[in-house]
Each structure stands twice: as C-alpha cells, then as structure tokens.
Amino acid sequence: MSIALVRNPGDGRDFPYYKSVIEQVVTTAETSGAVTVMRLTVNHGDAPPLHSHSREDESWVVLSGRVRFWAGSTSLAECDVHDAEPGAYVYGPRLVPHTFQAITPTAELLIINSPGAVEGYFHAIGPADARHDAEHADVLGQYGVVTYDNPPAA
C-alpha cells in the first residue's frame, strides 16, 4: 500500500458550513493528526472575524480569485494587509491574529491546518443563512480559537 495520498478536486467529502459548502480534502484521521486540508469557495461578504489559533498553524493556497489577508494585531485597523492572487501561498502561524476576505466576487482556497484537529469546529457549525460566530464562541474555545474583531466590511 502506498503512503501517498492524492485527492483531486471533488474527491473529498462535502459538508455545509454557514452559507458555504466545504470539501474535506484530507482529514486529521488520514494523517494521524498531522494536518487537515479543506477546499472552500468564499463569497466577497463571507469573511470570518479576526481570530487566532492557539493549537495549529494555518496556511492558505489561493486557487482562484483574489483574497485580502489581515494579520498581526487584535484590531483590523492595526493589522498588516496583503492581497493574494491565484497561486499564492499564505502562512499564518499559531497565536497570530488573522482573517481574510475575497476581494473578487468569489475565491477558491485550500485551507491547511497543522496539526489538524480544528476540522471538528467546521463540521460542528453546519449550515446557516449568515455567519453567527459570536454564537459559537464556546465551540471555538474548544478548539483553541479566540475572536477579536468583526469581519472586514464587505
């Protein structure tokens, strides 16, 4: 048996997360906890609040569209701002506050968390007509995630 894992787009299991559908490309279980990878198409107005992770580093690969990233402060106004285009790789180390927003109508991203346990949070939320992050602070806390500021304005 090969130890390599190859997943083409659409090979993973889809699950709802707020108004989006996320493809679980690679699960924590499949990598013995080392990493989780999700594919997400985000709309311009679907930005998460500024937040940090205490347990994992997070990376993004922009597959299509353009995405703006804020990082480095607990206030959006004080964050460094970077725009990423298709093919860009973005790294967010644990404990560093960050958020992102599509600056095109939609953008497709690979989200990579290492180690990978945070995927449980995304599965726990399920579908909703809009983001309700404040209502899920207890679930976020179970995964070592802290929110700081409202999402970027659409």
Image (cartoon, grey):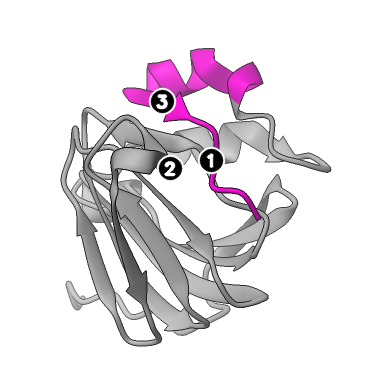
Q: Position of residue 114 (x, y in %)?
A: 21, 48
Residue in the picture at 51% in, 59% down: 101
- Residue 133 in the image: above or below residue 21: above
Q: Nearer the viewer, mark 1 or mark 3?
A: 3
Identity, as a three-letter code, of the amino acid under mark 3: Tyr
- On screen, residue 67 above or below 122: below
Disc 2: CA contacts within 10 A as few (<14), some (14-19) or many (>=20): some
Pointers 1 and 2 in contact (CB under 8 A)? Answer: yes
Q: Quadrant of the N terminus?
A: bottom left
Label 2 or label 3, whichever lies nearer to me, is 3
Residue at 36 percent of width and 32 percent of height: 75
Count of numbered labels shown in the rendering: 3
Residue 119: which numbered mark, if any? 2
Instruction: Tell me the distance, in whole angstroms, between the alpha carbons under discs 1 and 3.
Output: 19 Å
Residue 9 image point, x, y percent = 51, 82
Q: How many C-alpha atoms fall within 10 Å of the one at disc 3: few (<14), some, or many (≥20)?
A: some
Q: What distance separates the C-alpha of mark 1 from that of mark 2?
A: 5 Å
Q: What kind of residue is marked 2?
A: Glu
Disc ID at residue 122 = 1
Q: Tell me the SS state at disc 2.
A: helix
Could you say which is closer to the camera, residue 36 or residue 138?
138
Q: Which residue range is magenta in the image? A: 134-154
Q: Is residue 56 above or below residue 44?
A: above
> Can residue 143 be seen from the camera position used here?
yes
- Image side of residue 28 versus residue 126, left or right: left
**Which amino acid, mark 1?**
Phe
Q: Which quarter shows the C terminus? A: bottom right
Residue 132 magenta = no
Which is more N-terminal, label 3 or label 2?
Answer: 2
Residue to which mark 3 is pinned? 148
